[in-house]
Amino acid sequence: MKLTEIKDLLRCDVLTGGDDLSMEIETVVASDGMSEILAFAYPGALMLTGLTNVQSVRTADIAQVRAIIYIRGKRPDAKAVNLARENNIPVLVTTLGMFDVCGILRDAGLKGGM
Amino acid sequence: MDEELFRQTYSIHGRDFDKAGETAAHIKQILRELGLDAGLVHRAVIIAFEAEMNVVMYADEGTVTFTLTEDALKLEIADQGPGIEDIELALTEGYSTATDQMREMGFGFGMGLPNIRKNSDDFNLVSEVGKGTTVSAMIQLNSSA
Ligand SMILES: Nc1ncnc2c1ncn2[C@@H]1O[C@H](COP(=O)(O)OP(=O)(O)O)[C@@H](O)[C@H]1O
Ligand SMILES: [Mg+2]
């Protein structure tokens, strides 16, 4: 499904990349552990995380993640958002928690990582 | 002939968490520009990133050298740091001596070295306590895993 539909489902704020949310998302990787993201993300996956530092964006870039959604209303700092912008990774925030976000996206037909 | 087509060395500074990952991101850029297979690039940058993070987390100074030949992509990450006493243990999934602060940053789940090994066609770890650690990883260009 399209990222813009995911944004509506999870009632997200968009911090960067909002001009084009038309990309197709098929798989999701969800973790606060960066090694886990690296080990389990398919290239092109959507990343869900509660970790908001600049390393979360670095990890997303390395893992070829297509977009990041920060959960529990946690907002990344300006450094992190800027790095995401430089790498063309849309950044969204939802107030929902990890369990609910995963449940909603799974019900919507999205799949997990490897 | 295993002639070198490309070689570059980067230096990494221990504890510099803000810059951590820049080298791996740069290598990704180069490999993409060279037109390498996306799956190979994926494996290579995961290796580079996890190894770079280990230098940042545990060592003082280090270098990443990446070499490309007709047949293979090689990454060598060498550091001057505390070294690893029990290599077998360090390679065990879940084993980590990371601090709470590192865990809060999302690292220190004991998956780095296992991830590196898993993504390598050939993997070698040499370490001397008090001196440093060298991780060598090779990816075959004609392999498809
Ligand atoms: N370059 C290094 N220098 C010293 N110790 C290291 C180095 N790389 C790894 N180690 C040791 O091996 C352990 C496991 O490493 P790794 O699998 O990357 O997991 P993590 O970094 O999450 O702890 C580390 O916790 C650390 O004790
Ligand atoms: Mg590690």
Image (cartoon, rainbow, N blue to C red):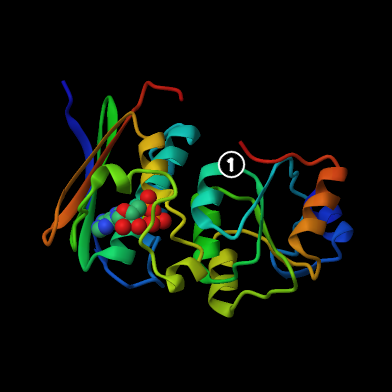
The answer to whether A111 is drawn above or below residue A105 in the figure is: above
The location of residue B109, given as percent across then percent down, is 47, 55
Kindly indicate the quadrant of the structure image that contains residue A21. bottom right
The location of residue A14, given as percent across then percent down, is 75, 69
The answer to whether B28 is drawn above or below residue A15 in the figure is: above
In the picture, measured across the screen, residue A83 lies left or right of residue A8, that is left
The answer to whether B68 is drawn above or below residue A37 in the figure is: above
Location of the N terminus of chain B (image quadrant) = top left
In the picture, measured across the screen, residue B107 lies left or right of residue A18, that is left
Kindly indicate the quadrant of the structure image that contains residue A92. bottom right
Residue B70 visible in the picture: yes
- Residue receiving disc 1: A43
In the picture, measured across the screen, residue B117 lies left or right of residue A24, that is left
The location of residue A109, given as percent across then percent down, is 84, 39
Residue B31 visible in the picture: no
In the picture, measured across the screen, residue A66 lies left or right of residue B27, that is right
Kindly indicate the quadrant of the structure image that contains residue B123. top left
Identify the secondary structure beneath mark 1. Answer: loop
At label 1, which amino acid type do we have? Pro
Using the image, name the chain to which the residue with label 1 belongs.
A
Residue at the far bottom: name it: A78
Residue count near mark 1 (Cα–Cα under 10 Å), binned few <14, some 14–19, many ≥20: some
Q: Residue at x 40, y 60 (%)?
A: B21
The location of residue A63, given as percent across then percent down, is 52, 48
In this view of the protein, which residue sits in the foreground, B106 or A28? B106
- Image mark count: 1
Q: Residue at x 67, y 75 (%)?
A: A75
